[in-house]
Image (spheres, rainbow, N blue to C red):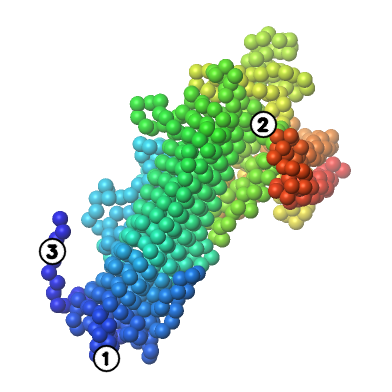
Amino acid sequence: MVKVELNSNSIDCKIPEKELIGKRHLTPEEIQILEKNQNKNMDPTWQNFYVDAEEGGFNPYLVVSSIFSGYVVLGKIQAATLNYNDLHLSCGISYSYFNDVILGDYVACHSVKYLWNYKVGNRVILFNVEELCCTKHSKFGNGLIKEGETEDKRIWIGVANENDGRRILPFESMIPADAYLWSHYRDDEQLLQRFVELTEFGQSKELNTMGFVDDDCVIKNSRIIKDAKIGKAAYIKGALKLKNITILSSEAEPTQIGEGVEMVNGILGYGCHVFYQAIAVRFVIGRRCQVKYGARILNSVLGDNSTISCCEVLNNLIFPFHEQHHNSSFLIATTVMGQSNIAAGATIGSNHNSRSPDGEIFAKRGFWPGLCSDFKHNSRFASFTLVSKGSYQYELDIPYPFALVSPGTNGEEINIAPAWWFMYDMFAITRNKNKFTKRDKRVVKVQNIETDPLAPDTMQEILMAIDRIIRLTAEHLKKNNLAALKGSVTPEEIYQAAKDNLHQNTNMDFTLVDKNCQKKYGAIILKPEKAYKMYRKVIKYFAARTILEFCDYLGGEAITLELVEKIRRLALYTEWENVGGQIIPSQKVQELFGLIKSGEIKNWDQVHLFYKDCQEQYEKYKVRYALYLLEWLYSRPIEEFDESIYKNIVEDVTIVASTIYENSVTSREKDYTDYFRTMVYRNEKEMNAVVGALQENEFLLQLKEDTRQFILDIERVFQGIIH
């Protein structure tokens, strides 16, 4: 019901004192001019009205046909034109309604039908806006409560689970790392309570909020903007509804919101573009993201440099570099750890097999489901899993990184080809780091994002996959009573026999059965012997490359036994986590939790400094882990490595580096030689005009030079030990 409140002739002006510095009341002549220009003030004395005190700073002729109430504080209003692209408007106020408004210098405010409780910066254009208002209890999308409010007024985001079992509070500086730690460590009640306290630290609970539009913003042809905090240089055109929201924007990373957009209860990051009927409710969207073409994002956190178009995204935690462009795809109740691509028709989290919608999908980085693939809760995928087109009727647990997963021929077992990327599409996986580095358009990088497919997190997964292949091979040998066991009896002997078998036999043609990869029917592991050897090669390559990079970090030194000893004294971490895109030792995560619970870390800015400290030590963490991996590969401590082992490392890594380049060329070359790829072109010249000539491929040319230099550097770095 609409309530009627009679106005009094006096206006209670509760103006912040700092806003009146350099301001003055109107002169009688200025009041007369304003009233002649069809302006009306609910305070007939105009004592609620303040203008710039500088001589000539206020031109009353530029204020026309407007209504004023509460208090009004104006900056410089002078004869000037504000230009933004093809929009040209004069400085001044016309056909608008103001109540408790503070304007900066040189503002063009025309046809703003309802402007209430807002502070507006300098050089701002407000044109044809139906409602721009702010309540005294606004939180601007942050998960706070104000004085007198109950907990049910707090805004939560139900990421990763539709039943709010992993819910988190949004806040202005949130990044996916924060959301991950909060949502995935739910067994520590003290920690969860401290996360709430970190969010509230330093935040005012007073009922005195005022909406804010910062300098150089343009807002035009929009309907409802309520309880919004809008950063510098933001451009908003044709928005339908923006409510309880922070729009982060800067001159270096301006944010744009376009036609038909509705955004409620959330934080929009720097440099984002949201256009064409997109909808977001209860969200945090990171830096340099695009949301467009009717996309629907609800109860989700989206990492930096991601694009969501057309599709439906509900209850998700998504790390940086996520791509989802198709109207016929949707993502529900998932944690996707970035560098992912969701194909058309992909249905991720499409159905629930319990009595409550509490299932989840968990996919590590590099997740790439194929066209029209669908999955059942709960399912889990290792890093860089490529899933072939198909309907997967049972829950999946894919522990093999860089694998291809495909439906089985009998409709029961699925097929898994471990290390598939390395054997059959090296171009794509090698290009990965370069591709994402180029796509990283962030000006300010709050957190490091690991874009290299070969990093400690994936090496840890490869170690686990190798162990799994050995154990499955042992079961295979026992079941078939093969002579390869050579009389082995104990579990340790059988394990070693299986390992030796994978090492020594070069023409083994067999498959393995992994019952835990799919509920009910399990999975067939294809070419396990090749995958085992490829995984080992990749570990050796990563370890040697990491040592080389560390030597370069020290100034191009060759590695020596003395340097090896120094590296051995560094802290060794063998368990790693992808924390919002940054790879951090699991032990450091626990250390962070201890600091939070003890109260030593008091706010999220200090948490972010902890991430930064971890990144500054990352090269040291990696190089110590690299030595650990070499010891694991050769089953002996570094001190027992002889010259032949170091020569073997150099030779094998050189071969791997050359193979990476050659396989990358071969992978890409297929696009130029395969009949079905070339048949749409009249001739080779037309094909090269469309897709570019193979010999001119920028990435392959750079990879060739990098490989040549890498081989020379590997030989140089290990000279100190080989001789």
> In front: 262, or 506?
262
Residue that badge 3 annotates: 4
Residue found at the far top of this picture: 481
Is tag 3's residue or tag 1's residue first in the polypeptide sequence? 3
Q: Amino acid at mark 2?
A: Trp
Mark 2–mark 3 contact, CB under 8 Å?
no
| Cα distance in 3D space between marks 2 and 1 | 82 Å
Residue at image x 29%, y 54%?
145
Which residue is rendered at x = 60% and y = 52% of the image? 439
Helix, strand or loop at disc 1?
helix
Q: Quadrant of residue 226?
A: bottom left
Q: Nearer the viewer, mark 2 or mark 3?
A: 3
User: Could you tell me how far apart the alpha carbons at marks 3 and 1 are, in whole angstroms?
Assistant: 34 Å
Picture layout, residue 694 above or below residue 486: below
Quick one: 426 or 137, which is closer to the camera? 426
- Label 2 belongs to which residue? 420
Residue 1 in the image, given as x and y percentages of width and height: 15, 55
Q: Which residue is mark 1?
A: 29
Question: Seen in the image, is 537 located left or right of residue 49?
Answer: right
